[in-house]
Image (tube, helix red, strand yellow):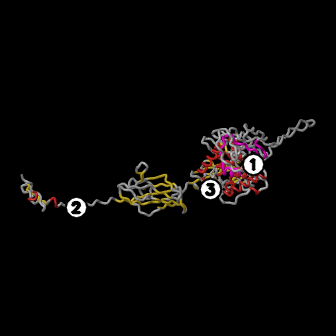
Amino acid sequence: MSAHFGSRLRKGAVNTTVAALAVAALAASQAPDVTADTPGGRTAADAPSGDSPTEDSATGNSPYYTDLPPLNSPVPSTTQGPGTTPTGAGGSSETGIPATVLDAYKKAADALKASKPGCNMPWQLLAAIGKVESGQAGGGRVSADGTTLTPILGPVLNGVGFANIRDTDHGAYDNDAVYDRAVGPMQFIPSTWAWAGRDGNGDGKKDPNNIYDAALAAGHYLCRKDWDMATTSGMRKAILSYNNSTEYYNTVLSWLDYYRKGSHEIPDGTGALPGSRSDGGAGSGTTPSPWSPSPTAPSTTPPATTPPATPGPPKPGGTTPPSKPPAPPAPTTPTDTVDHLEAAGATKLTATAGDAFGEKISARAETKAGKGVGKVRIRFTVTGGDAKFTGGESVATVQTDSAGVAVAPALRAGEKTGTFTVRATVVGRTVPALQYTATVAARAADALARTSSTALTCVAGGEFADQVEVKATYKGGAAGKVAATATLVAAAGGTTANGKGPYFKDAAGNRVRSLTDLRTDADGLLKLPKLYADDNAGTYLLSVTTTGGATLTVELTVTAPAPTTPDPSEGTPDPSEGTPDPSGGTSTSPSGGASTSPSGSASASPSSASTGS
């Protein structure tokens, strides 16, 4: 692997030591929510983790690559020409990340920052898992759009050295109609991809063989239970949910720590292929490498059956008795013994939009005799609604306990009201599905009150200075996102809109006296648009109602305009304009001016006489 080791690292003391160093380094950098886990808690390096979730892993716990990074810190490589392989400390093809693959990891992490910011997903974690699962898509052998040039398939999960997972996709993803196999650069088993798959490159398809799709799906899978990658416990649970192995966890952490110290991009197709697998196989050994140019042939051998009985020798004087029919196949896994599913709790659930359902859905796997079957995977799928399980997914797969019961994660209602169903099915076996009915009621309020006591008055033809604001509550608490209407009613207790008086304006400036499709905010508050008054004075009523029956009537007062008062100065003679003469003429003011004689001719006073010739 690296000149620093002289040979490729394998499972053993060196592997454990390097992984332990990575765990310690990462624990020191993580948020101090819990004491950092250490890898020394088990004697078997590849033992299942005791604190992993009960949900089945993304990979079906398929084999993975155990190669570890070199001990030297990575150094960004210098720019090199097309087709060349970077070399040097920290710049080798073995530790570099192919360009398209690296781009897919970074874009997936950026997308998760927007959709699931609380997860704090670093792209280096996706790169670490991609390295361990497929050697970065087989050294970056991908097309321009990120699709692997040849299928990357894990071993057949037929129970021989691996998990026994019967076919769930009819061979659509893994080309195997008998058993499942992990698929693609992030090694999803088909049953997990069916609900976790994402379209990461925007081509309208969800392809597990595309690194953009697979990287985004891996990110959502790791973040599905609101685990925080900035904490030790959150990251541990997420990684172990991907593959339930302590050594897997340690190996991923070693690459995560390495990539966090630095990383470099190499051309597509120039990455080194891993050499050591957790099952003892090697990339170039007899066990097919997942990036083999031609995928291994699909398995066609059905589950082992008891061979038919051999006919005995003919009896004297009679014919050969018919041979006994072959015995039915002997069950090889707990799943094979499941005959049916039974509801282990309520089958009808109710919740208000946006709230969690009060009960969790649970199902019990039973044999034909009614005995519970443990270690069986039950898939719960939301159908026809927008409710989500914890983590924001509409599908959850849970393994049954020793009593055969699987309890689905908490289910939270969406905003879509009405009835939907949740189906429970057995993964890997065809038995009738269980149907659970769930009903979502609209958000409601039982009381409304104004947030201000200021009287609402306005002069006819004007506008109200204050907007009406109300608060909706339900059982004393704020009733957020509750539908409401506001109508200027003609009579108290009525619903008919008034034909005159105050009004609202629509977007075009037209008068409207009824508003629908209103909704309170998260705190239960609702502020209505500005109110205007027409020319009709009087007292009017505004009725606000909500889903749930809460009603509030608000009084509005429109006053008539104040009467116009005449100006006292209007109609009073101006002394300078003269006073009426009883004879009909006009006399001048004391300061002098023209006066009219009784005959109507004008005479000038001395002070106003015109000049002569």
Q: Quadrant of residue 36?
A: bottom right
Give how far across and how far down residue 305 sits, in percent. 81, 42
Question: Label 3 is placed on what type of residue?
Answer: Phe
State the residue position of label 2: 569
Q: Residue at x 68, y 58 (%)?
A: 28
Question: Label 1 is placed on what type of residue?
Answer: His
Q: Label 3: few (<14), some or many (≥20) within 10 Å?
A: many
Magenta region, mostly helix, strand or loop?
loop
Question: CA separation, marks 3 and 1?
Answer: 56 Å
Question: CA separation, marks 2 and 3?
Answer: 79 Å
State the residue position of label 1: 4
State the residue position of label 3: 357
Q: Quadrant of residue 577?
A: bottom left
Q: Residue at x 40, y 49 (%)?
A: 510
Give how far across and how far down residue 13 sits, in percent. 78, 53
Give the magenta range.
254-283
Q: Is residue 448 left or right of 249 when viewed as pictured?
A: left
- SS of the residue at dot 2? loop
| Residue 266 drawn in magenta | yes
Which residue reaches farthest bottom? Answer: 453
- SS of the residue at dot 3? loop
Looking at the image, is mark 3 or mark 1 earlier in the sequence?
1
Question: Label 2 is placed on what type of residue?
Answer: Ser
Q: Label 2: few (<14), some or many (≥20) within 10 Å?
A: few
Counting labels gives 3
Give how far across and how far down residue 74 sits, in percent. 68, 49
